[in-house]
Amino acid sequence: MTTTDTHEHHGHAHGSDEPHIPTDRYFINVALVLALVTALETSTYWWPDGMQTVATVALIIMMTIKFFMIILVFMHLKFDNRLFSLLFYMGLFLAILVYCITLASFRFFF
Amino acid sequence: MALTSPAPSRSLGAFRRPVEATGWKSWVFTVDHKRIGIMYGAVALFFFLVGGTEALLIRLQLAAPDNTVLGAGLYNEMFTMHATTMVFLFVMPLAAAFANYLLPLQIGARDVAFPRLNALSFWIFLFGGIFINTSWFLGGAADGGWFMYSPNSSGLFSPSHGVDFWVLGLQIVGIASLLSSINLIVTVLNMRAPGMKLMRMPVFTWMVLVVQFLLLFALPVITVALFLLSFQRNFGASFFDVDKGADPLLWQHLFWIFGHPEVYIIILPSFGIISEVLPTFSRKPLFGYKFVVFSGATIGFVGWGVWAHHMFASGMGPVSVAAFSVATMLIAIPTGVKICNWTLTMWGGKLWFTSAMLFAIGMIVLFTIGGLSGVTHAVATADTQQTDTYHIVAHFHYVIVGGAVMGLFAGFYYWWPKIFGKALNERLGKWNFWLMFIGINFTFGPMHVLGMQGQPRRMVVWPDKLTGEGYFDLAFWNEVATWGAFTIATGVSVFLWNVWYTHRKAEVAPLDPWDARTLEWMTASPPKAHNFDAIPNVHALDELFHRKYEEVDTDKGVRLKKTSTAEEVLAAEEARGDAHIHLPSPSYWPIVLAFGLPIIAYGIIFNLIMAFVGAAIVLLGAFGWVLEPSVAEPGDYESPSDDHHMKELDPVG
Amino acid sequence: MLVKPSRRAAAALAGLGLLLVGCAKDAPQDTFRPAGENARDIDGLQRPLFYVAGVVGLIVFAFIGYAMWKFRDRGQEIPEQSHGNPKLEIVLTVLPAVILAAFAVPAVSQVFALDKSDNECVINVTGQQWWWEYDYEKGSTCGGVEIPESIVTAGELVIPADTPVLLRITSRDVIHSFWIPRLNGKRDAVPGRLHTLRMHADEPGIYVGQCTEFCGLSHARMRQAAVALDTADFQAWVDNQLAPYQAPAEGTLAAEGESEYAAQCSRCHQVNGLTDDSGNPVLAEPDQSVLAGAAPNLTNLMTRTAFAGWTFDLISDECRDRLWNEPSETFGDVYLQGVWMYTPADATTPACFNELNLREWLRNPPAMKPMYTDPDKLEATDGLTRGMPNLNLTDEQIEVLVAYLLERK
Amino acid sequence: MADTAVHAGHESGHHVTTTGLSNNKLAMWLFLGSECLLFGGLISTYMLYRGRTGDGPGPNQLFDIPLTSISSFVLLMSSLTMVLAVNSAKRKDDANTKLWLVATALLGSLFVGAQVYEFTAFYQEGIGFTTSLFSSSFFTLTGFHGVHVSIGVLMLLALAAMITRNRVAGDKAEAVELVGLYWHFVDVVWVVIFTLVYLIPA
Ligand code: HEA
Ligand code: HEA
Ligand code: CUA
Ligand SMILES: [Cu+2]
């Protein structure tokens, strides 16, 4: 949590630590990629039955990509102060941890 | 948000903003963290008496075999509500009281980050607590035990409205805790005085911070569980309906994913309190500050991976059991670190056995007993003998009453002069301590024996034919436990008497009665509305101590000498104070918004129309809230820059 | 009165003294007195655990006590403001870790050891509000004894001694937990799930227990016992359970009781072999009346020593005490006589029969054991009871029913 | 939550915080971290129960993937309009801010509308909230998400109205950003739901 330790009062905090915000163009490009990935995701619905496992793995990967693209870009986590990431990832990590263990104890995964 | 924003002063036209600085309105509409803290404390103490009275009734029923004080149904309601009241309406809010009052002071802030939100949390908690307890008069309280295992909690098996009250009430109280956790985390991260680095924060602040994170992440889990249960009870869903294929273990997991972090939510504030009290009365810094802070955070984290130790007999399978067993043992390590550090803080010190110090030491002793029995549960196969017996009841009352409650009482004695300007009577304090300390051992000590001799918990009656003789005379030990409980009650009564006595009789306490070390003692007692005339600049851990003491060379070597008093430190601070300080203004909206919630809940139970009325009130509150600027217009309210209104203020009132 | 201090306390103190010379009587559910393999294994781990915990505690208290005495304020200087000693901290972190690791290894291996579930003697155990039903599976072999037909009993679990038995536990309504402290730890009975628990008793005898998962109103009155018998006695017990129905002799009270029973009780309770006037078997349909869908099988009621969730004694207090203290060699003989135990051969009435309890039960069961049977309050269950309702029986009806039940031995 | 304690001596309109970060934004991120555990619990409940359909239809018979794909796409695009609103607000371009806010709200409403349509369609196929464990947990999960979206729509519209009437208390750009964070989070949750609930076969 080193970021929070450097906290001597800067004159006008807002101006100085305002994160770098990309242009509209950049966001539109990102949205196009997201749309593309969504299209790919949807296409798995028509993939042949034999490819179920592949589809599942692919879907999880695509989901993760979309998830982090939105979090990092649209929600500015990539550009913003690391403290925000820390707070959010704590929740995300705990959620994945406890719920996966719970599902595992119900023999959900195997 | 900013002050300069264009916002009309009377946002809803009809209402004037509350401006009173004295009288009941100054309490009901306050957004001052100190007043909110005091109100939290008063309400929590009230619920302690409620929960304690329930405990005494439980003990009366169990005093003799085949006793008939309470019927089976009433008994089940009694222990369910005893636990619910004690955990959610006493210990948690009392910790919130200390946190609210002290946290801004300890980090050198004027208030919490979101003062109105703070008021909202308090009112939601109060209304939620009252709501749960009205179930006693509206068809019976919840009777499923405090972990409310499904399917026994479903409408089929518990058809009275008790469980509905419990579910909705906890949901309401949970909102309060969630909001205040966000509020306090932001406060600690963002409102610190210049120089107050994280590793200069008092340990109490640290532990409260860890607790808020636990709340932040644990509450949504029980929220899910409660929603599932209320959808089942009120809207016909079947999440725990085995006939439809549900697995009752789902509830257990959800409950304990919340429930285990919850027990650390209960204990960590007390860890923080005694980490303040011990150094002060040992005249030494806390031994291994970093280790204590770090182990507190570790406990908070590891606490997320052990929940299923409450389910060793549930049949979840040997792999899960073994894994959780080992994880649970791990948690004894960081806790052990703390015990050692506290002991070593005393080591080499100059110990001053005030009531606060006695409570702190008593806390270590009793908590260690409870913690060690906790470790004996962690060995899963052994736990299959212990679980759901009085051995467990012994464990958790030692850690909760012996640990958390004793710690909170240490806090009372330590901070009372700060909060009310008068110190609690020390003689009464010692009576208070010894009665509670002895009472706790006599109440919960025998329960270790009772459990291992086979007395299960949650039993309205215990048959005579199952008591042995001599050492194994369970009837005898049960009777001892009952006498012990009344000894605790006597101790608590002494405390209440002490509060009254102090309020009426005691003289104003000196500014720094304990020769304390942290920032909250660097301001007036009770502090002014704006806490500090000038926000202090912090240079070290234990800032105040460093301002009071200096190392001087004497003929015997380097010695610590008191070079200035707290009064002098304070005078110097006040001299550089700001002339004009704006504080956030009181507001109607928190209490309005909070009031809507129990109405919604009553509506869900009795009449949906009422629920809509409640929702309308909540919306109204939210609407007024958003449009209201945090500081009143000059015409509405002049923030006091001096403390004239604090003098008229009745601190206990 | 709530608290009866003096006499009991005095007795207890006296007992405490006796304990020192080794004569205290154990509580029947004492977990420190394992009577079978599984419980003994647990005990073997649990005892050292308690000792070590105790020693750690004593060390901590000794340190605190010493510090309190040594460093009390005697006017000494303000001590040096030392902030700690990382090396010492690390030692004090590693030490508990080592102790814990020493327990973690046997703890984990014991979890798996106790979980083995291969067994030829399988008994299905079903919990419900507020009693246990046992179903001995047809075709299984228990300690060399064949179970040719399924046997259904309630409350008292009879097993062969010195033989591993596997319980398959489930529930018909809410969660319960099966626990016989002297034989093994607990295992929850969860509706919709099947859990196994191993039972093993070294010697013939009676081992009592209690449902330990809170299961509603009468959780406190949901008890159970395991009775271990040697092979011959177990064989005899099985034979008796499967013996053909013996109708009461014509003209006796019991015969009147039989028709009373058929009229009043058989809709919920089963007595195997009972037939109606036209010779058709009378089959209970408890699911029509009871929420859990079952009521205790009464075929051999008098072979049990307690009833209604094994809470109320069917035998008198003296007989119970004698039976519980019976040496293992003679235990089986006595036990197999049911309520006729300790009865002279020429007597016509059973000396040990606790008729009062049974009568009281038949007069008004919910008054004796809290249950949900009030018709006005059964909305949530569509009129199905949880427990046995008050049937408003007359004295005469009770008289004949008791006579009839007395022959179910 | 437009609310904060005021430090002395800084009446310039910007208060100073220890980390230099905005209280409101920290609070929002904390809240979102907490929401992870809320939705995690609901998703896990669904995962556990998705196969327990009783006599009713299961996910495979029920879901209309093309329709849901379109509504997922709509929600995804609303994230784009949202981010454009935030950028406009940063540029102090009120007109465009309002435009994009309303556009986002419209897309959000479209999504909610599609969900309502989907629910009615399911209902007509004989699957209600109480039909089976699958249906209860499905409706609870997607319903919770729908409620989140609806609250988001309300906030967007209220914000647009407040900007029009110039009644935003405090930093306008930040207010837009906060609503934006919430909105994106709700979108991200749907990304997960769309994959785990709809696309991966049960
Ligand atoms: C304040 C609350 C609190 C705290 C702090 C703890 C702390 C611990 N608890 Fe406790 N617990 C409860 C409250 C708490 N518990 C409650 C309320 C229940 C019952 C809920 C219910 O069923 O109603 C419960 C139940 C409970 C169970 C389930 C029992 C059962 O139902 O079968 C278990 C099992 O592992 C357990 C274990 C532990 C452990 C290992 C710790 C550890 O954190 C303790 C660590 C402390 C020490 C070990 C002492 C100090 C250490 C040293 C001196 C170092 C040296 C030590 C060693 C070498 C061992 N607890
Ligand atoms: C914060 C938590 C907390 C606290 C502080 C306590 C405090 C006490 N508890 Fe509690 N208890 C629980 C949490 C707590 N308990 C939980 C979680 C359970 C499990 C429930 C379940 O199984 O579901 C439980 C269960 C429980 C049981 C077991 C019931 C059973 O299983 O059947 C018993 C039995 O003795 C008991 C006793 C006590 C006693 C004697 C106190 C004493 O320390 C109380 C002392 C306080 C007072 C005595 C108050 C002072 C009162 C007066 C001075 C009287 C004056 C009155 C007026 C002015 C109105 N508790
Ligand atoms: Cu069955 Cu408790
Ligand atoms: Cu726990």
Image (tube, helix red, strand yellow):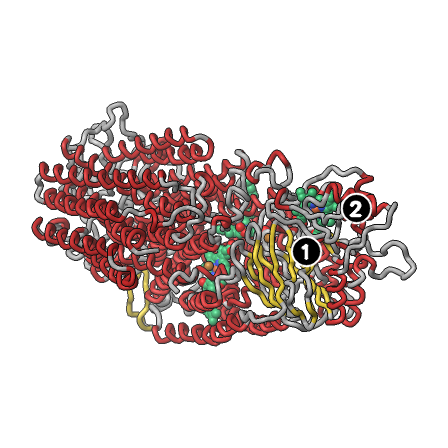
Q: Quadrant of residue B394?
A: bottom right
Examine the rendered structure and indicate whether residue C175 appears above or below residue B341: above
Q: Chain of mark 1?
A: C
Vertical side of B282 occupied by D42: above or below: above
Q: Quadrant of the N terminus of chain C?
A: top right
Q: Nearer the viewer, residue B189 or B42?
A: B189
In the image, what residue occupies the spot 35% across and 73% down?
C85
Q: Is the same chain shared between marks 1 and 2?
A: yes
Q: Marks 2 and 1: in contact by CB < 8 Å?
A: no
Left or right, C357 with reference to D135? right
Give the residue type that dot 2 points to. Glu
| Residue at mark 2 | C258
Visible residue check, residue B575: no
How far apart are the alpha carbons under marks 1 and 2?
A: 21 Å
Give neighbour class at mark 1: few <14, some 14-19, many 20+ (Cα, 10 Å).
many
Q: Give the amino acid type for the residue marked by disc 1 in the picture.
A: Ala
